Amino acid sequence: MAITHNLGFPRIGAQRELKFALERYWRGECSRDELQAVGSTLRQRHWQQQADLDWLPVGDFSFYDQVLDMSFTLGHLPQRVQGYQGDVLDNYFRVARGRSVHTDHAVQHGEQAGAHCAGCHGVAAGEMTKWFDTNYHYIVPEFTADSRFKLDASRLLTQIAEARQVNGGRLSTQIKPVIIGPLTYLAIGKAKDGSDKLALLPQLVNVYAELLAALAAAGIDWVQMDEPILVTDLDGRWQQGFEQAYQQLADSRVRLLLTTYFGPLQDNLSLLARLPVAGVHLDAVNARDEIAPLLAQLPADRVLSLGVINGRNIWKSDLCALLEWLTPLAAQLGDRLWLAPSCSLLHVPVDLESEQQLDREIRNWLAFARQKLDELTLLARALNDGRASVAEALTANAAALASRRQSTRVHKPAVQAELATLSPALGQRQSPYAVRAAKQALRLDLPLYPTTTIGSFPQTAQIRAARNDYRAGRLDAAGYQAAMQAEIARSVREQEALGLDVLVHGEAERNDMVEYFGEQLDGYVFSQFGWVQSYGSRCVKPPILFGDIQRPQPMTVSWTRYAQSLTNKPMKGMLTGPVTILNWSFVRDDQPRAVSCQQLALAIRQEVQDLERAGVSIIQIDEAALREGLPLRRAQWDEYLAWAIDCYRISANGVDDETQIHTHMCYSEFNDIIAAIAQMDADVITIETSRSDMELLDAFDDFNYPNEIGPGVYDIHSPNIPTEAHMVQLMQKAAERIPPQRLWVNPDCGLKTRQWAEVLPALRNMVAAARTLRASTAA
Ligand SMILES: Nc1nc2c(c(=O)[nH]1)N[C@@H](CNc1ccc(C(=O)N[C@@H](CCC(=O)N[C@@H](CCC(=O)N[C@@H](CCC(=O)O)C(=O)O)C(=O)O)C(=O)O)cc1)CN2
Ligand SMILES: [Zn+2]
C-alpha cells in the first residue's frame, strides 16, 4: 500500500484571505481575535481539502513565515526584541516587520520596516532573504556565540489539537507536524558576530529533543523534519553535524521523516541513508536518478517517501509515465513507499477551479495545489487498487498531455527559425565602454554624481482601484489610460520639483514587473487568482509561459513616449530582463530553461530597439532575479551564468553607442558572480548596498569593475527617511572604492511599496546629498 502525504499547503488562501486579514490587522482595522479566526478558518479549510491523503501536514500554516515560526518555537529571538512584554502575535510581527519610530503599531500598509533604526526608538525588522532558489523570502535567524534556545511548543500543540477537530473529529487521516530541522535552521541563519554557528548545535538539538518529546506526549507518531540544506554543497563539519544531531534525536519516541527537496543529494546521499531516522523524503522530480542508489543504501526498515508531483510548477503530471516506474517500486516497497509532492506546495497557487477565465485548452494542461494532491491520490489508487480503478482519470490525463505536446500554440516554427539564427554576437555592443561613455556624456550632459530612481513610484490604492475597475469593465480603456497618464504626469512633476537628473515614468500601469510583460507576450497566459506568497502578506502572480514566445507589438513605448513628452530631462525606458522574467514566471518543462530564456531575450531586444527608435536615450533592463536563479550547487553555476548572461546581452546590447543601457539588481551578494556581472557590460548598474554600508562595493573594487555604478543609498524596505548626511557618508565610502566619475546616486530598489509621504522627503535628501558631493568634489 503506497501511503500519501503532503509536505505543506499554501496558506495565503485561495482569495488571499490571509493577506487581507493581516493588512487589516496591521492598520488597526480588525482585532487580534478576528485575525486568529481567519487563520483558524484557513487551517480548517486546508485540512479538509487535503482529507483524502493518509497524512496531513500540521504546522505549515504561518501568519508571516515558517522560519520565523521556528525561531519562536525554539525561543530564539533577536536580542533587540527579547524581554518585550505584550501579546506574542504582536511581538512576532515586530520581529517580522520592525516597528517604525512614528507609530507603535507594527508599521502600516503591509510594509517591511527598517533594519536601520540607529538613534531612533523603532525596532529593526529581521532581515529577509530568499528561501533556497525560490521567490519566497524568510526572516533570517540571527545567531551570536551566546544564542540560547528555549522550547515553546504551544503553536504546534494548539494546531495539532485543532487538526484533530476537523470534521468534528471524524477525520480518518492522520496528523504529521512539520518542522524545520536543526541543521537547516542553523545553516540558513546568520552569525551576527561572525561566530561559528555549528558550535550552537548541541544545545539547539537539546531543544529539538524536548520538542519531539512534547509532540510524542501529544500522541504524535510521525514528524516531518525538513532538511533541504542536504541538497546543497556541505562540508565535512556540517555532515558531521548531521550525524551528531540525528544520533542524539534517535532516542525520541516519535518517528522522523527527514525531508529533502529542491534537488539531488549527490555527496550527501550516503549521509542521509545512514542517519538513524524512520524515513526519508527525496525530491523524485529533480533527483529521480538517486532513487536506486538511495534504496541500495537505505536500511530495510526505512520508509522512502518520493516527491513525484512537481511542487514548483503548475503543469499536470504525466501520470501514466509515473505509474510505469512507480509500479515495480510499489511492489518492492509495499508500506514503505510514501508518495508526496516534491516539496511544500507553498510555491504554487491554491486552486485551478477558481480560474474560470483562463483559456480552456491551456487550463486543461494545468494543476495547482489542490489538483496536484488529486493527482497524488489518483496515483496511489492506481498503485493500490489497480489502474482499472481510475482508468477514466488516467485517460483524461493522457489526453491533456497529448494535447499540450501537439499544440501549435506551443510550438511555433517562426520562433524556432529565429532562434536558430541567434548567436552571442548579437550581445556585442558596437564599441567598448570607454568609447560609448564619451558619446553618451555628450548626448546626456549629466552632472557628476547624477541622481535617478530605480523605476517604480508608489502603487497607491487609487492606481490599484483604477486597474481593478478596468479589469471589471467599470472603466474603459481610454479611462484607464487617462488615469495612468495622470499618475505618470504626477510622478514626472514630483521628480522635476525634486531636481532629479534622470527621470522614470513610475510604472503606475504595471501590476508587477514580470506579470506585466507576461500579459503582453504571446506564449504566455496569466491567471486571476494564481497568487503565490513572496513575503509576509505580499504576493506575486507569476504568469505562465506555455509556448514559444513572440512580441506582437511594443509593450512600453507609448507610456515612455508620453512620459518623455512631459520633460526635457532624460526619461529612462524601463524593462524587465529575460532572466528575471524567466525566473519569476511558471515556465515550460518541455524544453530547457535556457531556450525559453533565449526567446524572451529576443522579445526584449525588439522592445529595446523600439524604445531606441522612439528617441529614448537611456534604457534600464532590470535583472533582479539573476542571482536567485543560480543553481543550488556550485558545479552548475558556470553553465547557468553562461546562458543567462548571454540572454541578457542579447536583449540589451543591440543598440547604438549613444544609447545608455542600465541594469538593476537588488540583492547583496556579488562576490561570487562579479565576473559575470561585468560581462553584462551595462553602461550603468544600480545595486542594493545601503544596508551593507557599501562593503558590497569591495567586490566591484577588487574586480576593477570598469563601468558606472549606482550603489543604493536609500533603503527602500524601511519607512524611515534617510538623512542627507547619512547618504553623503555612504557615497563618500563608495568614492573610496570607485572613482566619482563613475558613480550614480539612487535608492536601493523601486519605490512601489512605499508611500509618497515617505518617498518625497527621502528623495529630497538624496538630491541634496548629491549636490553636497558635487560641491565637495569640485572644491
Ligand atoms: N514577481 C516579482 N517578484 C519579486 C518582486 C517583484 O516586484 N515582482 N520583488 C521582490 C520582493 N517581492 C515583492 C512581491 C510582491 C510585492 C507586492 O506589492 N505585491 C502586491 C500585488 C501586486 C499586484 O500584482 N497587484 C495587482 C493586483 C492588485 C490587487 O490586489 N487588487 C485587489 C483590489 C485592490 C483595489 O481595488 O484597491 C484585488 O484584485 O482584489 C495590480 O496592481 O493590479 C501585493 O501583494 O499586494 C512587492 C514586493 C522579489 N520578488
Ligand atoms: Zn530592485
Image (cartoon, rainbow, N blue to C red):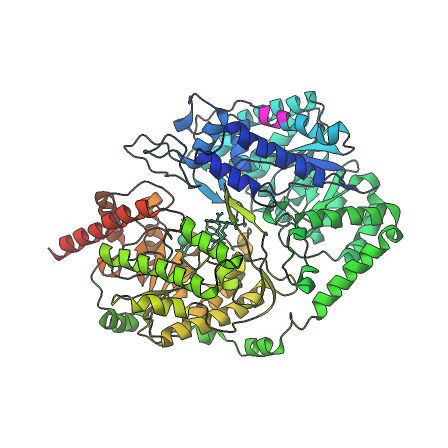
Q: Residue at x 57, y 68 (%)?
A: 595
Q: Is residue 154 magenta?
A: yes
Q: Is residue 203 visible?
A: yes
Q: Is residue 744 visible?
A: no
Location of residue 283 in the rendering, given as x and y in whole percent from the top left corner: 67, 48
Q: In the depicted view, which residue is nearer to us: 133 or 488?
A: 488
Q: In the depicted view, which residue is nearer to us: 155 or 456?
A: 456
Q: Residue at x 75, y 50 (%)?
A: 375
Q: Residue at x 68, y 30 (%)?
A: 163
Report the side of 591 relative to 26 (left or right): right
Please give the range of residues in magenta: 143-158
**Residue 168 vertical position relative to residue 603 in the rendered view, above or below:** above
Location of residue 239 in the rendering, given as x and y in whole percent from the top left corner: 59, 38
Location of residue 389 in the rendering, given as x and y in whole percent from the top left corner: 87, 50
Location of residue 122 in the rendering, given as x and y in whole percent from the top left corner: 34, 32
Task: Name the quadrant of the N terminus.
Answer: top right
**Residue 6 vertical position relative to residue 205 in the rendered view, above or below:** below
